[in-house]
Amino acid sequence: MNGREGAGPPTVRPLVAWRWQADAQRAEPLERLAPEETVIGLSYDSEPYAVLMATPADVIDLAVGFTLTERIAAPNEVLEVRVSEQEEGLVADILLSKVGAARIRDRRRRSLEGRSSCGLCGVQNPQDVLRAMPRLPPGLIVTPEAIQAALAALDNEQPLGLLTRATHAAAWASAQGEVLLTREDVGRHNALDKLIGAAARAGLDPASAFIVVTSRCSYEMVEKAALAGVAMIVAISAPTALAVCKAEAADMTLVALARSDGNIVFAGQSRILGPGRAGAAA
C-alpha cells in the first residue's frame, strides 16, 4: 500500500505476533499489519531545516502543510516540492520564491528530530513555543447535525487506520458536514499538517470549512488549524486547558469529545448553536 503521490516506501508492514486469549488460556499466532514510520527530512532550497518521523505517504502534503503552519512561507511562495529516497529515509526539498527564502532566515529552527507524537520537538527557543494567535473571522456557522455527519463519514475515510488501528486521521469538512479531504499518519500533528497542505494545494477555502481530528486536542493542533485560517476544530478526544485558551485567543470554535451520541463545545459556541440556540441552551 503506497501513498497518493506514487511509488515510494510501503505504508504498512505485515508482522507476526501472538494473541493470548483469557477465556481459552492459550496463545495462537496471527499476522497483523503495522503502519510504517520513517525519517522524513525537510529542506528549504536544499538547506536542511527539520527531521520528522512520519508515515511515508502524502509527503508533499506534509511538506506544504508544515511550511504553512510553521509560518515559514505562504502557499503562493512554495514553488515546488521535490521528494527523494535516501538510505536513511525520505527527503522533501521545498523550493521557495525569493520572498519566502528571505523570510525563512527568521523562522524557528529544529535542533533535533520531530517525533510523531510531538509537534514541537527540537524547537530551540522557549519564546518560540507559544506564538501569538490570529483572530479568526466569525462568518462560519455549523450545525450540530453537520458535525455528526462529518464524524460518521470519517469512519470510512481511514484506509490505513482500518488496516492497522494504529494511526490518526484529520479531515477537511464543509460547513454542511461533507468530508472533502482526509489524511492519515502515525502522528496526529503530521496528519493535520498533511491535511492542511493538501487543502492548500487543492485551493480549498479555509473560511468555509472545519477540521475533524481523531486524536486529543492539544494546543499545537489548535494553533495549526488557526494558522491555516480554519475557524473550527472538532476532536474525538478531550482538549487540554491550554488548547481551550488558545482557541479563545483566536476566537476559534473548539469541539471535543465528539462521538456518535454528541459532543462538548469548549469555545466559540456561537458558530454552532447560534444566538438563538445558545440562549435556549442557557
Image: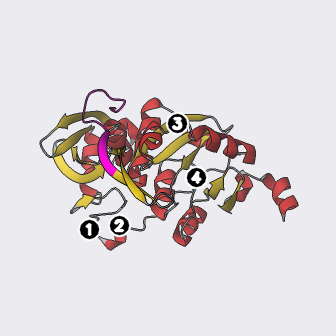
Q: Is residue 36 visible?
A: no
Q: Nearer the viewer, residue 69 or 16?
A: 16
Instruction: Look at the magenta stretch and give its main secondary structure.
Output: loop
The region drawn magenta spans 1-17
| Circle 2 Cα neighbour tier, 10 Å, few/some/many (<14 / 14–19 / ≥20) | few
Specify the amino acid type for callout 3: Glu
Mark 3 falls on what kind of element?
Answer: loop
Alpha-carbon span between mark 1 and mark 2: 8 Å
Tag shown at residue 157: 3
| Residue identified by numbered label 1 | 124
Specify the amino acid type for callout 2: Asp
> Residue 124: horizontal and vertical position, in percent?
26, 68
Q: Does residue 125 lie above or below 258 as drawn? A: below
Q: Residue furthest left?
A: 87
| Residue identified by numbered label 2 | 128
Q: Nearer the viewer, mark 4 or mark 1?
A: 4
Specify the amino acid type for callout 1: Gln
Q: Is residue 28 magenta?
A: no
Alpha-carbon span between mark 4 and mark 1: 28 Å
Specify the amino acid type for callout 4: Ile
> Residue 56: horizontal and vertical position, in percent?
30, 41
Q: Nearer the viewer, residue 12 or 147?
A: 12
Q: Nearer the viewer, mark 4 or mark 3?
A: 3
Label located before the other in sequence (4 or 3): 3
Label located before the other in sequence (4 or 1): 1
> Residue 36: horizontal and vertical position, in percent?
30, 45
Alpha-carbon span between mark 3 and mark 1: 36 Å
| Circle 4 Cα neighbour tier, 10 Å, few/some/many (<14 / 14–19 / ≥20) | many
